[in-house]
Image (spheres, rainbow, N blue to C red):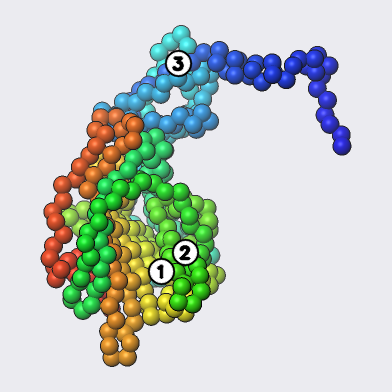
Amino acid sequence: MVRPSLPRVLRRVPRLTLLLAVPSVLAAQPRASLQGTVRAAPTDVPLPYAVVTIPALGLERFSGANGRYALLDVPVGQHEVVVRRIGFVPFRATVTVRADSANTLDVRLVQIPVRLAQLTVRPTEPCRTPGLPDSTKFPEAAMLVGLLRENAATYRSLANAHPYTYAQVRALGTLLGDTLRLGVPLAERVDGVRTPVYRPGRVVTTTGNGPFAQTSMALPTLLDLTDPGFIANHCFHYRGTRVADGATLVKLEVRAADRLRSPDVHGTFELDSATGQLRRMALELSRPDRLPSHLREIRAVEVTTTFLEFAPGLSIVDDVCAVNWTRPSGRRARPHSAELQRVGAVRFSETAPPDIPLLQEFPRAPWPRPRALFGEIAACSELGKG
């Protein structure tokens, strides 16, 4: 085996000395701060909770409620700075940070216009060529995918810079006709973000055999939307708008590739046309006919998630509604299994984003009585109408 040799002078230096020399050089490097304000162009309105990043250094901070930010302990020299905000065109610039002067970078972001009158709704098509939509052929879909991915990136930035847990109430039940029977609601503490587990065509897994078989479904989360594997196996289409609570929501449909012969997911994502913020995500299991034999009575699975904007531009999961819709057995209807989740509070582990308390509580009205609650479940699932 041929080993590359060090220059003769370096060979005489003890190995321990070499290892200790590297950190000492880095520690001696001068450092400074970079600060400024993020505003909207051309109005100059401060933009709260924009993400200011130096990617090469892994430095990432949110602007405060007044749009001001500060990156501390930045090595002196030239750095690429990226500023992002949902609904705005990202800003990039190379900045020289000096040790002997005030380092200021004021940024003005241009809003991405969502021109609803110019968007064309196309008929649903088979997903034969999955991947990011061609911006020259389908500019409306490409724009919406960009907004969706920015939502996911901001969601990830929040979890990385300010880890948090949230308190939720979860209730399991069965739905038969117009009667919902819920078990005792359970209070839980849940990590704000999990590691994405999406694998194309592998959202359904079964362990064990026969009567001991257990099947689980790992449906994609918002974070999975930035995963190259998810994008490469789905098609994206603009699906019109709807009005909810006075806001116009733009719908982006996501369909699993035809080449996936095992269950994956289709879905619809609804974004606020004014802010680009994701408000609702409805995922439906594709290819339910390919479920394991012991689950063939299931005709559809749908999970609907709504998002709560607890600060301008920052959202967390709010309500989750999941329903397994079953086929009737002859003339006899089978009960559908249902699960509801509702967030009641968020606690940041160490530090919160600027101007936000460590603990935020969201007072919620109690869940309505069973018969009224059925309306909530049916509303969260289009399949419930069938």
Q: Amino acid at mark 1?
A: Leu
Q: Quadrant of the C terminus?
A: bottom left
Q: Please say if 204 is above or below 85.
A: below
Residue 285: mark = 1
> Residue 155: percent from the left, percent from the top?
37, 44
Residue 183 % position (x, y): 23, 65
Q: Residue at 36% x, 35% y: name it.
A: 162
Check disc 2 and report the residue beneath it. 203
Residue 301 figure quarter: bottom left
Amino acid at pointer 3? Ala
Neighbor class of circle 1 (other Cα within 10 Å; few <14, some 14-19, many 20+) is: many
Ranked by sequence position, the earlier of labels 3 and 2 is 3
Q: Earlier in the sequence, mark 3 or mark 1?
A: 3
- Answer above or below: position of 235 versus 75: below
Left or right position of 170 against 227: left
**Nearest to viewer (mark 3 / mark 2):** 2
How many numbered discs? 3
In the image, 181 versus 218, the foreground residue is: 181
Q: For marks 2 and 1, give the CA distance.
A: 9 Å
Mark 2: few/some/many CA within 10 Å (<14, 14-19, 20+): some
Outermost top residue: 100
State the SS at label 3. Answer: strand
